[in-house]
Amino acid sequence: MDDEFPLLTTDHAIEFIREELGVPVTKSTFEKRVMQGEGPSVARFYGRRKLYSRPALREWGLSLSTSEPAILVPDSDAAA
């Protein structure tokens, strides 16, 4: 079903991750991860633009979340 939809530019990819997956990723974080090789795989280039597939974005976006709850450590200054 995902193959019926066009590939997404960076801005649309970020919007997809936020709205479809509920993952709060910023454009700067997305671009930084892509440049470091830690982002979603690029499906195709259109000139200088990177284009992403929805399945690759879904897989990457879901990998950002964790099922483990965060452990908050109290600030030692606050206890005093």
Image (cartoon, grey):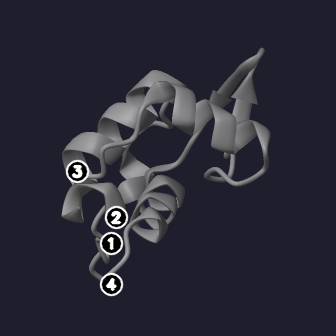
59 and 24: which is toward the camera:
24
Give me the residue at 32% from left, 33% from top.
15
Q: Are marks 4 and 3 in contact (CB under 8 Å)?
A: no
Looking at the rendered structure, the kind of residue marked 3 is Glu
Determine crowd level at label 1: few under 14, some 14-19, many 20+ residues with C-alpha closer than 10 A.
few
Looking at the rendered structure, the kind of residue marked 1 is Val
Q: Which residue is mark 4?
A: 68
Q: What is the distance, in whole Å, between disc 3 and disc 2 at their CAs?
A: 39 Å
- Reading the chain from its start, which is encountered first: label 2 or label 4? 4
Q: Which circle, 2 or 1, is nearer the viewer?
A: 2
Secondary-structure class at tag 1: loop
Q: Which residue is mark 1?
A: 73
Q: Which residue is mark 2?
A: 76
Q: Which corner quadrant holds the N terminus?
A: bottom left
Q: Are marks 2 and 4 in contact (CB under 8 Å)?
A: no
- Reading the chain from its start, which is encountered first: label 3 or label 1? 3
Q: Position of residue 42 (x, y in %)?
A: 69, 44
Q: Position of residue 79 (x, y in %)?
A: 21, 65
Secondary-structure class at tag 2: helix
